[in-house]
Amino acid sequence: MAEYSILVSRSARKELEGLDAPHVRRIIAKNEKLPDNPPPAGCIKLVGEFDLWRIRVGDYQMVYSIQDANHLVDIIAFRHRKDAYRR
């Protein structure tokens, strides 16, 4: 299986910058495992969405899409669980 590239959207980057250091470290540790296995154990495909997945990291959700044709993981959001699915 080919390794995937990770792209973090500007809005997700801003959300990550607003979190405290312990949460950021846990999220980054999860992100480092994504290039080898984009849908790792514990990730869930979002119902009603074509290609969106989520991973729970503590009290936060990381929402991302997997583009197999381009070998790309596009991280869309890092949000608290209660706010993760609000548009």
Image (cartoon, rainbow, N blue to C red):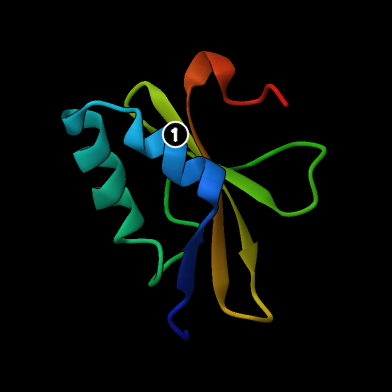
Residue nearest the observer in this picture, 79 or 66: 79
Between 25 and 47, the one lying in front of the other is 25
Please tell me in which quadrant of the rendered image residue 63 appears: top right
Q: Residue at x 46, y 66 (%)?
A: 6
Give percent across and percent down for residue 10.
53, 49
The amino acid on which the numbered mark 1 sits, given as a three-letter code, is: Glu
Vertical relation: 9 (above or below) 25: below
Residue 60 in sight: yes
How many marks can you see?
A: 1
Residue 53, compared with residue 59, is above or below; it is below
User: Image quadrant of residue 71?
Assistant: bottom right
Q: Position of residue 37 (x, y in %)?
A: 43, 67
Of residues 24 and 44, the one nearer the viewer is: 24
Q: Position of residue 15 (x, y in %)?
A: 44, 34
Residue 43 seen in the figure: no
Q: Residue at x 56, y 72 (%)?
A: 72
Toward the bottom, the furthest residue is: 2
Observer-nearest of 9 and 72? 9
Q: Is residue 72 left or right of residue 52?
A: left
Secondary structure beneath label 1:
helix
Q: Residue at x 35, y 28 (%)?
A: 18
Q: Quadrant of the C terminus?
A: top right
Q: Residues within 10 Å of mark 1 (few under 14, many from 20)?
A: some
Residue occupied by mark 1: 15
- What residue lies at 50% left-to-right and 64% top-to-bottom? 7
Considering only vertical position in the picture, is 45 above or below 85? below
In the displayed structure image, the side of residue 70 where residue 33 appears, left or right? left
How far from the left and from the top, in percent, is residue 59? 37, 21
